[in-house]
Image: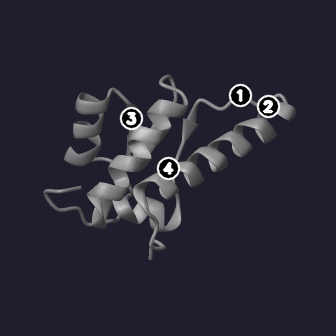
Amino acid sequence: PMPDLTPDSLKAWLLVQLGGFRALAQSQGVPVDQVRPHGALYSAFYDNPDVARIVAETVYQFDNWMTLVGPAGPLMEQFEQELGVRIGPEMHLGKRYDQNC
């Protein structure tokens, strides 16, 4: 489950993670052009649209050319249209999907 963080705290935590990840990758000559949340953050795209929106907004703010990979469906499409964030929808073979994702 997601820890109880204020939206501002979650955003700050995400920016630290994104910055650290990009710095590590760049130090090894590896470009970073997409990110995929994992664990509770990824589950938020199914369970907590408010948290998912903060993730999408923060990725876009961090780098508006970066692609956010997440579950295919209307929520990701909404973020792309409303926020401008680039999305990389993914689906998992063998998983059952409903109308939300």
- Label 4, label 3: how far apart the Cα atoms are: 19 Å
Which residue has dot 1 on it? Answer: 31
For residue 25, side relative to residue 50 (left or right): right
For residue 89, side relative to residue 68 (left or right): left
* Residue visible at 49% across and 38% down in the picture: 59
Q: Are marks 2 and 3 in contact (CB under 8 Å)?
A: no
Expressed as whole percent of the image width and height from the top left, the position of residue 53 reads: 33, 48
- Label 1, label 4: how far apart the Cα atoms are: 23 Å
Q: Earlier in the sequence, mark 1 or mark 4?
A: 4
* Residue visible at 51% across and 57% down in the picture: 9
Disc number lying in front (2 or 4): 4
- Label 2, label 1: how far apart the Cα atoms are: 6 Å
Q: Earlier in the sequence, mark 2 or mark 1?
A: 2
Mark number displayed over residue 26: 2
Is disc 1 placed on a helix, strand or loop?
loop
- Rendered-image quadrant of the N terminus: bottom left
Q: Amino acid at mark 1?
A: Pro
Q: Earlier in the sequence, mark 1 or mark 3?
A: 1
Which residue has dot 3 on it? Answer: 87
Q: Earlier in the sequence, mark 4 or mark 3?
A: 4
Expressed as whole percent of the image width and height from the top left, the position of residue 55 reads: 43, 48
Residue 91 visible, this angle: no
